[in-house]
Amino acid sequence: MATPHPGLYKKGRYWQYIIQAHGQRAHGSTRATDLATARKVLEEKRRALIDGQLKRPTRIIAASALISEWLRVNRATFSRGYLSSAECALRLWVMPVIGTLPVTKVTTSQVMELRARMLEAGCSATYANNTMKTLKAIFNFGIRMKYAQEIPFHLPKLKVQKQPRAIVPANRVHEFLEAVNKAARNPHIPVIIRVMFGLGLREAEVLGMRWEWFDPEQRTYVVGKAKGKEARVIPVPDWVWSAIHGMPKPVLSEWVFPAEDGKPHRSQFTKKALQKVCGELGVDTQPRC
C-alpha cells in the first residue's frame, strides 16, 4: 500500500523525510510541522542529494569513541564537578548498553532500556533526565563532527515530583545559623545564608550582589537582577549589614561574593552546607544521595 505522502512521515510534531537517489539514502527532520513546508524541504533535500551536497557520515565510529572525544574536547570548558558527574553516569549506565554500537545504529528502544536500568537500580528521575540530556549533547556534538546526521533516539523527559523545601522554625534560626558556621568550608557561605534569611532573597540573587547596589546612607540594597526582572529596594537589617561588611576582602571586586576566579560563585554554592545542616537538625526534606 502506497504511503499518502511519499518520502515523508510524521514523528512527534515534525515531518521526517527519507529520500534515495543514485544509490544514496538520506533521512532526517524537515523541522516543519505543516505538510506544505515539509514537501518543500523534501524537494530541497532531494535536489541536494542528487547534486552531491548531502553527504553521508564520512566516518563511522562507535558510541564509546564519540563519548571519549566529547569528553576530551570539553574537558577545559565544563566545570570539574559536571565532568565528574557526566563521566560517572556515562561509565556506569550508557557505555554498557550502547558503548559498542555505531553512533548511527543507536535506537530509541536501547536508550529507553538504559534509562529503565537506571530507574530499576534506584536512580532518581532527575538523575536519569540529566544523563539523557548529556547523551543528547554528545550526539549533537557527533552531528557537528559529521559522524551522524541526526540524533537517533527520541524520548520525552521523565516527570519529576517536586520535593517540599526544608523549613526552619523561627525558634531554631539561631541554632541553624550557628550550625552553618561550623559546616561551611568557605567563609562566604554563612554570610550568604544570613543574607538569604534577612533579605528574603534567592541564592542566585545573593550570588549576583554588587557593592554599587548598596546605599550606605539609607542602609538599603537594590536587587538589580531578580527572577521577575524587576528592580526592588530592600531595607537591610543591622545584623545583615554587619555580616556583609564585616567579611574579609582579600580581593577587590565589583561582586560582594567573588569566587577565586573573580566571578560570582556558581549556582547551588550553598547546597552541600545546607543539606548537611538540615540533616543534622532534622529539618531535611530533600532525598539524600
Image (spheres, rainbow, N blue to C red):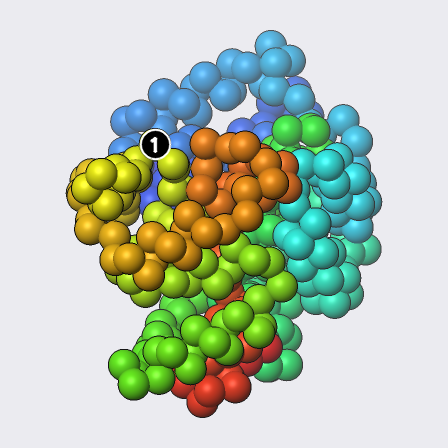
Q: In the image, what residue occupies the spot 34% across and 58% down?
A: 240
In the foreground, 214 or 284: 214
User: Residue 102: where, in percent of width, then height?
Assistant: 76, 47
> Is disc 1 surrounded by few (<14), some (14 to 19) or many (20+) residues within 10 Å?
few
Instruction: From the viewer's perspective, tell me whether residue 228 is left or right of residue 105.
Output: left
Image quadrant where one finds the C terminus: bottom right
Q: In the image, what residue occupies the spot 38% across and 42% down?
A: 209
In the foreground, 30 or 77: 77
Q: In the image, what residue occupies the spot 54% across and 37% down?
A: 263
Total number of numbered labels?
Answer: 1
Q: Amino acid at mark 1?
A: Glu
Give the residue number, with chain letter if any, for mark 1.
Answer: 212
Q: Quadrant of residue 76?
A: top right
Q: Quadrant of residue 65?
A: top right
User: Residue 271: where, in percent of width, then height?
Assistant: 50, 65
Disc 1 is placed on an element classified as helix
User: Residue 31: where, in percent of width, then height?
Assistant: 39, 33
Q: In the image, what residue occupies the spot 32% across and 65% down?
A: 197
